Image: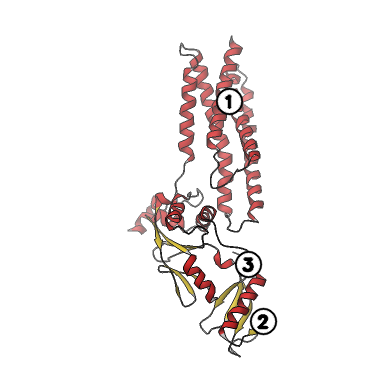
Amino acid sequence: MEQKKIFAAVTVTEGAIKGGVPIFYAKDDEQKAKIASTLANINDGMVHELDNGVMIIVQH
Amino acid sequence: MQLQNYLLVIIIGTLAGTITRMVLLRVDYRQYPGYPHGYIVHLSLGFIASALGAVAVPAVMAKEYTAFTFLALAAQQFSQIRNQERRTLESLEESELVKRGKDYIEGIARTFEGRNYLVMAAAFITAVATQVGLNTPLEWIPGVAVAVLMLFIARSFMSGQTIGDICTVEPAKIRFEGATLWVDDIAIFNVGLPDRREKMLSDALGVMIHPKDDNARATIHDMGQRMVIAHTVSVILGSKKDVDKPDFTPILRKDVDTGKVAMYMMPVERDINAMVECVNRTPVLESSLRKPLSAKAGRAAAD
């Protein structure tokens, strides 16, 4: 199996994520989805959404 | 007279072998070997294999027993073919969006090697029959009859099992629970973007593969076999996957309790009946075929 790697996280809640990966803050959910989509496109990654609304971009 | 007889034996044997190879060489959805040059390579090798098989008979008749050892040489050549096929397919695999998987490649390579032996055997047996026939009033007729028989045997030998033989395939419903994509009651994966989720709801197709018995369950448990299903369906129906859209990769996940497998995909041609048919017709790989029910412990565990 190939290695999976989280390489960015997008959130609207400041402080929801700390350290480890590049964090992008969005002003609302719409912007969050847009940023995540762009990041995924750039890195050929996939966007996943966690329960707390944080989106992570993962390369599978 | 003797020399002419031998010539006839060789010609009938070689022809039988070559025709068998032609019949076994179908171009189908596997698209392999889909090109004239692939054809030429395999037809020529089939011709050589059948000539070797056919020549062995007059060689033995003429008490040239060492000639028989050439068959060993041929065997070595054929295992080379297997390596060569494997290498070709492996290098093609790199640019494949929905991969065949190593198991499928190994299966195809082994088939190519195996068919050459099959052809050699067909040529040899036909040559023996022709040789025997020439000493009777029937002359060349037994040879031709055996050639036709070998052709049918080879054909039935070629057709292996398909998923439809060991499983029942049914259309399944695609739905979302939060960000998680479900096919009926099996969770597939998490999709973050709302517009992707909408697109999947409108374009995706899902099927459920129910194994008919414990043997089938063990077979579709194999990841290689599941990759073959994904590859086959993607070739036939097309897949919306692209390098920057990994979400559209066809995925097969099993239910850990029952062993049934759910498949999700984004086809270009959205036709659920065609998709069920594709899954049904997918070949079962020799390497993933498992038979736990053949073992005593397996039977005991099953009930």
Q: Are marks 1 and 3 on the same chain?
A: yes
Subunit ID for the residue under disc 3: B
Tell me which residue sits at (64%, 35%) in the image: B40
Q: Which residue corresponds to mark 1?
A: B14
Residue B190 shows in this picture: no
Judge whether B292 appears above or below B46 on screen. Answer: below
Point out which mark residue B244 bears. Answer: 3
Q: How many marks?
A: 3
Quadrant showing the N terminus of chain B: top right
Residue type at the position of mark 3? Asp
Front: mark 2 or 1: 2
Q: Which residue corresponds to mark 2?
A: A22
In this rendered view, identify the residue nearer to me: B140 or B191.
Answer: B191
Q: CA distance from mark 2 to mark 3?
A: 20 Å
Tell me which residue sits at (40%, 51%) in the image: B166
Please state the horizontal and vertical placement of residue B87, each as a whole percent of the image: 66, 48
Please state the horizontal and vertical placement of residue B65, each as a whole percent of the image: 61, 22
Point out which mark residue A31 bears. Answer: none
- Image marks 2 and 3: residues in contact by CB distance under 8 Å: no
| B99 horizontally vs B284: left or right | right
Q: Secondary structure at mark 3?
A: loop
Residue type at the position of mark 2? Pro
Q: Secondary structure at mark 1?
A: helix
Residue type at the position of mark 1? Thr
Q: CA distance from mark 2 to mark 1?
A: 68 Å
Q: Are marks 2 and 3 on the same chain?
A: no
